[in-house]
Amino acid sequence: MKVKKITTIGIFCALAMIVNMFAFMPLVPTVTWLTYDPKDIIIVIGGFIYGPMTSLIMSGICSVLEIMIKGGTILDVFMNMISTCSFACVAAAVYKHKHTKQGAMIGLLLGVVITVINMTIWNYIVTPIYYGMPRAAVVALLLPGIIPFNILKAGLNAGITLFVYKSVVAILRHTHFIEASGQPTSQTKSLVWVGLFITISIICIILAIQNII
């Protein structure tokens, strides 16, 4: 692995842990223990640049660092990695195969879908063990809480990724951490507008759910 790549991944991991400090906001009132975590944005950008294996490595590093800083158990590492990899690794794998504007959007959309499916399944399995809840109580929370939370979380991360990806890559190219690409500027600009629309729309939905607007 090249020194520049290792350095960039290290910077991304540090940024992911910094934004992880803002993982305190519950998105859905019925499942207040589930809070929004923006570190997946940094991890999927790393995957877009270097491939899905980078997202996997970053996910593992960040999950371990998170329990070292905030505390937790091996179940926290396990659930963090499933959530992040479902989103970031899937999106990065699609984008690696189809390195276009459409590939980025399809990858992120598929990442959202896989995240919702996987986290529904694994919350059904793990949450009763972790919190000592009856499984029937978890089932009752799936539709009004757990599923909407993961749709909003993954959707918001997808929107913000599209919005900031161009700027992040531009900075990395300017500092010579990554090589320049021949991708047309018009393509990346359209991604920014799509990302901004998705981000604003989901924020409005979250505020409405929280009875703020």
Image (spheres, rainbow, N blue to C red):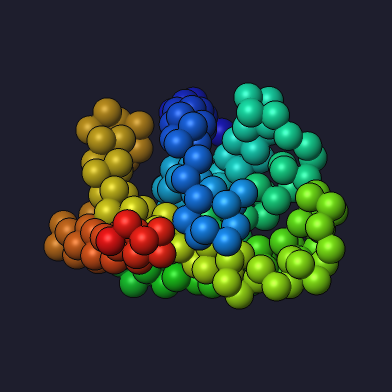
Is 25 placed above or below 87 here? Answer: above
Quick check: 39 left or right of 72?
left
Residue 153 on image: x %, y %: 48, 58
Quick check: 64 left or right of 14?
right
Quick check: 60 left or right of 149?
right
Residue 90 at least partly seen: no
Image quarter for residue 100?
bottom left
Image quarter for residue 136?
bottom right
Residue placed farthest to the left in the image?
A: 186
Is 133 placed above or below 41 here? Answer: below
Residue placed farthest to the front in the image?
A: 211
Q: Residue at x 60, y 57 (%)?
A: 31
Q: Residue at x 63, y 24 (%)?
A: 69
Q: Residue at x 76, y 67 (%)?
A: 137
Which quadrant holds the N terminus? top right
Quick check: 140 left or right of 160?
right
Residue 145 on image: x %, y %: 58, 66
Residue 202 on image: x %, y %: 35, 63
Residue 205 on image: x %, y %: 35, 66
In front here: 74 or 7?
74
Is 85 placed above or below 16 here? Answer: below
In front here: 152 or 11?
152
